[in-house]
Image (tube, helix red, strand yellow):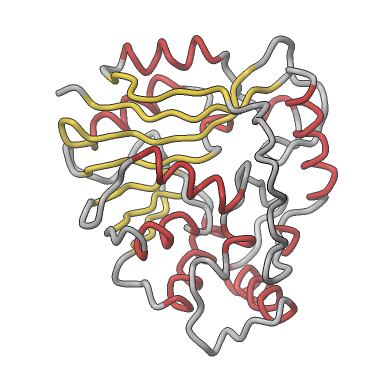
Amino acid sequence: MANIEAHYSAQDIEARILTALREAGLDPEKRLTPEELGALDHFHTGGYRASLRLLELSKIRAGDRVLDIGAGLAGPARMLAVEPGCDVDCIELSPDYCAGAKLLNRLTGLEDRVNVYEGSALDQPFEDNSFDAAWMQNVGMNIENKQKLYEEVYRVLKPGGRFAFQEMAGGDTVASYYPLPWATLPSDNFLIPIEEMQSLLGECGFVSEFFEDASNPQPSGTPEPPPKVQLSLSAYVDDLGQKADNAIRSVKEGQIRFVRGVFRKTR
């Protein structure tokens, strides 16, 4: 998740988003689609395409009730609401992101399918056994207490529910290039090694259905098409280019790993 460097008012974050949409040639007065917004509101490694890949792995189905943890602007939540067709609750700590998410829900006409709650992933306002699936992308690296995080995810999932995530993990050496998209300073960065992540999930009661280190994907041989519109996280993230370059360099040098997983609640 990309950090907002300063706390903006709800009005300011809405104004920034509306300006970015208009500069990209989109009309906020017309109904927008989650795909059109993908370059703006999927602010995690791999962007919109990575969300589609996680959806494929997660086997989330139409009618599932899904929890999006650390939802940011709720781009993946809107994607899930449209296809496969889920009701999604979002928990997000930043009031700025909550304001932006609610705006984009209105612009896509998805207010009835996507609910946004301001709060902590470590103390969620949901009942036990509430969700068919939990979804999390690039959030845990900002959370020091990983065990509490995974315990909360386990608590709110129904028995047999799946936890689908993509995450940054610690590599062979300590991350040394800052700022990163999620951490301006080393004190903001809470990466743990892959083995520790898997061990903690197991201790909480999860069973692995899928796990991969996707740090160095093999080229497909087919170039990806350019985005239809030129939206960017730079609408509200300072120094985005430098942060992205530092993250890419860190992955290439093995300081950071990029992983995906789907884990199931056993009982």
Q: Residue 153, image x and y in percent?
A: 32, 33
Q: For this view, does 178 lie left or right of residue 1?
A: right
Quarter of image, res 147: top left
- Where residue 225 appears, as percent x and y from the top left, is 69, 59
Q: Residue placed at 65% from the left, 30% from the top?
A: 217
Instruction: Name the one closer to the observer, 229 or 27.
Output: 229
The reply, left or right, for residue 217 in relation to residue 247 is: left
In the displayed structure, would residue 190 be above or below residue 76?
above
- Tell me the residue at 30%/66% (across/down): 113
For the N terminus, the image quarter is: top right
Q: Is residue 159 left or right of residue 211?
A: left
In x, y percent, where is residue 80?
37, 57
Q: Nearer the viewer, residue 56 or 235?
A: 56
Residue 213 sits in which quadrant? top right
What is the tally of numbered marks visible in this picture? 0
| x 22%, y 51%: residue | 64
User: If the image is split into quadrants, where does the C terminus sit?
Assistant: top left
Task: Residue 96: name its quadrant.
Answer: bottom right
Tell me: 253 left or right of 224: right
> Seen from this angle, which residue lies furthest front?
221
The residue at 60%/45% (across/down) is 44
Of 2 and 126, which appears nearest the observer?
Answer: 2
27 up-or-down from 239: above or below: below
Q: Give the x, y percent position of residue 87.
A: 27, 59
Q: In this picture, is 101 found above or below 21?
A: above
